[in-house]
Amino acid sequence: MAKAATAEAPAGGKPAGAADAKADAKEKKAKKAKRTVPRAIVYVKSTFNNTIVTVTDLNGDTLAWDSAGSMGFKGSRKGTPFAAQRAGENVAEKVKKIGVREVEVRVQGPGAGRESAVRALQQRGIDVKSIEDVTPIPHNGCRPKKKRRV
């Protein structure tokens, strides 16, 4: 039986068309169109340990976010109003570049950074149209522990 002839690879060790395919892929990849979103929704989730500020468009697609932890605060300093203020300022700068001018704010949680994150948005020139508290409240709560028998 005779061996079938195989195609030899060039001296570089890669198949002949590999470099050309990469170059074509880079050229075909179109730049993402820069969106301008005039109105948005800001979600401020403030816990005792951290504050997360997320900005979405009206469909719910995230435009930008930041948290006290991602700003570099560690430990108990993440739960402070100052850390929440810095996170709010940082998000405000990000979304101003996208074109956001007015927002609705939805605040959730019992933390200390609720108001300071919203104030930071206002100070950076973003018009806050409404503030709504969306903290989940139990209707009847958990089942109580069984009665103690002595």
Image: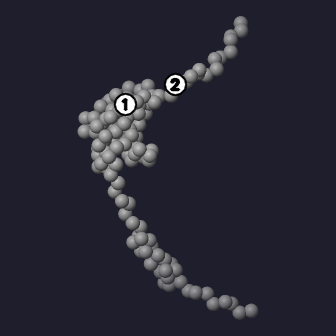
Q: Give the residue displayed 34% in from the left and 39% down from the top.
A: 103
Image disc number at residue 22: none
Q: How many marks?
A: 2
Q: SS for tag 2?
A: loop
**In the rendered view, does 43 fall on the left or right side of 118?**
right
* Residue 27 shows in this picture: yes
Q: Where is residue 119 in the image (x, y as percent from the top left)?
A: 30, 31
Q: Which of marks 1 and 2 is nearer the N terminus?
A: 1
- Callout 1, which amino acid? Ile
* Vertical order, 99 against 2 (above or below): above
- Callout 2, which amino acid? Ile
* Vertical order, 126 against 135 (above or below): below
Q: SS for tag 1?
A: strand
Question: Alpha-carbon distance for marks 1 and 2?
Answer: 18 Å
* Vertical order, 132 against 42 (above or below): above
Q: Mark 2 points at which residue?
A: 137
Q: Give the residue displayed 64% in from the left and 20% down from the top.
A: 143
Q: Quick one: quadrant of the N terminus?
A: bottom right
Q: Give the residue displayed 25% in from the left and 35% down from the top.
A: 123
Please identify, in this view, whether the residue under mark 1 or under mark 2 is nearer the observer: 1
Q: Mark 1 points at which residue?
A: 131
Q: Where is residue 99 in the image (x, y as percent from the top left)?
A: 30, 48
Which residue occupies the extreme top position in the image? 150
* Residue 70 shows in this picture: no
Q: Nearer the viewer, residue 26 or 12?
A: 26
Q: Quick one: quadrant of the C terminus?
A: top right
Q: Where is residue 106 in the image (x, y as percent from the top left)?
A: 41, 33
Determine crowd level at label 2: few under 14, some 14-19, many 20+ residues with C-alpha closer than 10 A.
few
